[in-house]
Image (cartoon, rainbow, N blue to C red):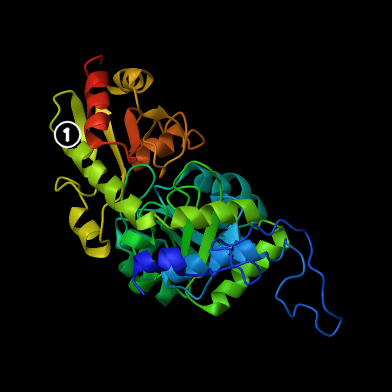
Amino acid sequence: MGFSTKQIHAGVKPDPTTGAILTPIYQTTTYVQPSVDEYLSKGFSYSRSGNPTVRALENKLAELEGGADCAAFGTGMSAVTATMLAFLSAGDHAIISDVAYGGTYRLCTKVLTRFGIEFTFANGADPNDVASSVRDNTKLILTETPANPTMKCTDIAAISKIAKKAGAVHAVDNTFLTPYFQRPFELGADLSIHSTTKYMDGHNATVGGAVISKTAELAEKVKFIQNSTGSIMSPMVAWLTLQGCKTLSVRMEQQSANAMAIAEFLEAHPKVEQVCYPGLKSFAQHELSSQQATGYGAMLWFEVKGGLAAGKKLMDSVKLWSLAENLGSVESLITHPVTMTHADVEAKERARVGIIDGLVRLSVGLEDKEDLIGALENALKQV
């Protein structure tokens, strides 16, 4: 089946009792067993360990990514945390993209280091830097590509080879591009992580996460953590995400087309200092992005001339674009990472990896591109 067919039909089937075309919301705690000898014969016992609605979403995401199995979590950060706990123990070392979501940075530096796990934040754009960061106790490499919020891209195939040589697991945060545009497993990765809150949902309705595993052996380790920590996704969230997935390809195509038009507009605007979008030929890693993905996504950032003060004025005055922390929704959002999504990253570290104070992040939605561009143009007149 093609991707668009899978996003609608994979993992789901009409309810056998009523014929309902949508998977029911199994809002239940426990499941009655036929007998002691037939315990788990129907696959479920307690909804912390598994739920039919959640399982339908897990099956769908596994098929969309081309993986062996999937574990769905209550939040994207729960998915990242489970990945860490599944493959790292006290005394182990992990390599993380030097540009990563602020929550991932906080988890590593403020929480997991307390339990004797070591982290190196390496330049994902330079495979040599990643290779030189490998230690004898390196067990996990987590790549975020494109990275939040700088859009830095990592050569997934190159890093996968480094991880394999080191005997480490390579996990790719595929939230920004989704399996519709980027296929980590085909490039050698072991795990694909998503904040399903973003494009999988696509409607600002839920928070959730998922870890898709390339092999059953890897999936078993992630599933163990999902059950042990009680971090499984709720049935209602799974049901809403199932509906969002059905339009993923259509949304990604249109949102990406809108993003390209907006990036081109901003790049030509006299009040804009710089624009960073993988689809632009001026993007430093345009060639890599074109090689390992089939689309450029709907995320970009720009800096207004006049720096932080001008950027704040634009964000506070722009219409139609909502000032908010999320991304990937049908509504277009504008964000200031330094004070919002990446506030927990130390100023020195932000500066080192290119998260400048004046960086304005855009998550481009499904509105008419003319309206989105017009709103930005009007706001730029005020700075």
- Out of 342 and 209, give the one closest to the viewer: 209
Q: Is residue 71 visible?
A: yes
Q: Residue furthest bottom?
A: 37
Q: What residue is shown at x 46% (from left), y 45% (from top)?
A: 101
Drawn side of residue 284 relative to residue 230, left or right: left
Between 290 and 236, the one lying in front of the other is 236
Pick out the residue farthest to the right. 36
Q: Residue 92: image x %, image y %? A: 58, 64
Q: Give the total of numbered labels.
A: 1
The residue that label 1 is drawn on is: 265
Is residue 118 something that shows in the picture? no
Residue 93, placed above or below residue 256: below
Q: Looking at the image, which residue is at 38% across and 70% down?
A: 160
Q: Nearer the viewer, residue 73 or 149?
A: 73
Instruction: Give 314 or 59, whichever is nearer the viewer.
Output: 59
Disc 1 marks which amino acid? Phe
Question: Where 22 falls versus 38 (above or below)?
Answer: above
Q: Position of residue 370 (x, y in %)?
A: 21, 32
Residue in the image at 36% along x and 37% along y = 355
**173 displayed left or right of 78:** left
Residue 129 left/right relative to 29: left
In the picture, the quarter occupied by the N terminus is bottom left
Q: Position of residue 321 (x, y in %)?
A: 36, 29
Query: Which residue is at the far top?
Result: 382
- Disc 1 packing (10 Å; few <14; some 14–19; many ≥20): some
Where does the C terminus fall, quadrant-wise?
Answer: top left
